[in-house]
Amino acid sequence: MSAVAEAVNVSPSALYRHFSSKPDLLIAAVVTEMTPFRQVFDSCAQADAGLDVLVDGLVGVAADVRRLGVLWQQEARSLPPGAFAELRAEIRRTLGQLAAIIRAKRPELAAADAELLAASTCSALCGASPRSRDLTRGEFERVFGHIARSVLGAEPATAADEIGAADHLPSARRERLLSAAANLFGARGYDTVSMEEIGAEAGVAGPTIYHHFASKLDLLTAAVERSMEWVWRDLYRALAEAGDHERGTAILRGYLDFVDRHGGYAAILATETRHLPADVGDRIQQSRRDYFGEWLEHIRAQHVAIGEAEARIRLDAVLAVAVDLARTPHLRTRPGAFATVERIADAVLFGPSTAP
């Protein structure tokens, strides 16, 4: 709190008169970032506006709100349980507004499908917005308009269309500990999870944990390294099995299957690498850059009409949708949820060029 007070040139005591704690301040910051979206939703609902008006409003807000995704994906999970529940309720209220508009415009959708599309729309725009400075204003409006329309117009899948299934875990204690750590770190953040909780989740008694991992940081390091091994393995498989102009799609299928089966591992790869030691973090970040660079190369080979900056933004949107779904239990357990995300991702990545 003292650092925040210094940044805004007020005394800590003055800051505490407005916010009683750091969790209260974080909740207020996220709600403030969400408020422009709520205003767009209120305006569209009152005017009975069409989806094009909604998209224009969403794109206008996304151009100016670039911090919401980072605040929610990385910072919010450090909140105490009660504060996190309060913030999640605020998020769900906002998504509920958008879901109601979607159902009004697409009455054939079930409530759960509309909620999934609402959550995916917000994830896509917030996930891609930090890179929006790479575009001119006109390019931004076209690219983000394409992303929003691709999500809002997606046809929900059913259980019969699902792309993956839950794996059975190995019985080895080390593997159970890795899986438990990834799931807990992915759901709650590295800082809030204890070794005792990991052991309890894995069914491994206290001191036995330390026979396999010397510390919580060792567990995180091993789990992140496992995540990178998985995505690279799937990429190699996609390159070997797909044709020249199908590899971008094949890598997408492999990545979504990874997120579906191993959501905790996918989440920590997206949000928890900042806790790694500097040398390990640098190595993982280089591996991530290489992996996504390889994927982007094949996306552009498959869709030659889009430039590098646009391809990166489209991919960022897809990654945010997939990882956010993996971390949202009531949505990810909906039958066909990941198959729906696959349809969204196909449309976002390989839809028409937005060039004028």
Image (cartoon, rainbow, N blue to C red):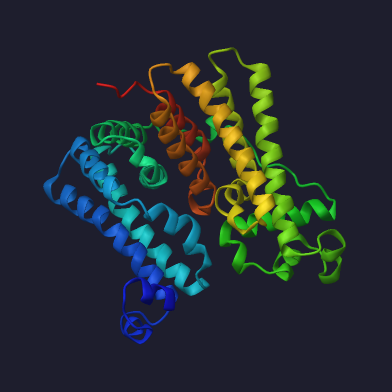
- Give the side of residue 334 with respect to residue 112, left or right: right
The extreme left residue here reads 47
Observer-nearest of 299 and 335: 299
Which residue appears at 23% of the width and 44% of the height?
60
Q: Is residue 117 visible?
A: no
The answer to which image quadrant residue 234 occupies is top right
Observer-nearest of 6 and 285: 6
275 vs 27: above or below? above
The quadrant of the rendering that contains the N terminus is: bottom left
Observer-nearest of 130 and 202: 130
Which residue appears at 24% of the width and 39% of the height?
55
The quadrant of the rendering that contains the C terminus is: top left
Horizontal and vertical percent for residue 39?
Answer: 20, 55
Horizontal and vertical percent for residue 285?
Answer: 60, 44
**Number of marks present in the image shown:** 0
Which residue appears at 24% of the width and 37% of the height?
137
The answer to which image quadrant residue 196 occupies is bottom right
252 vs 104: above or below? above
Horizontal and vertical percent for residue 191?
Answer: 60, 66
Q: Is residue 28 visible?
A: yes
Observer-nearest of 26 and 328: 26
Horizontal and vertical percent for residue 79?
Answer: 50, 70
- Give the side of residue 161 with respect to residue 147, left or right: right
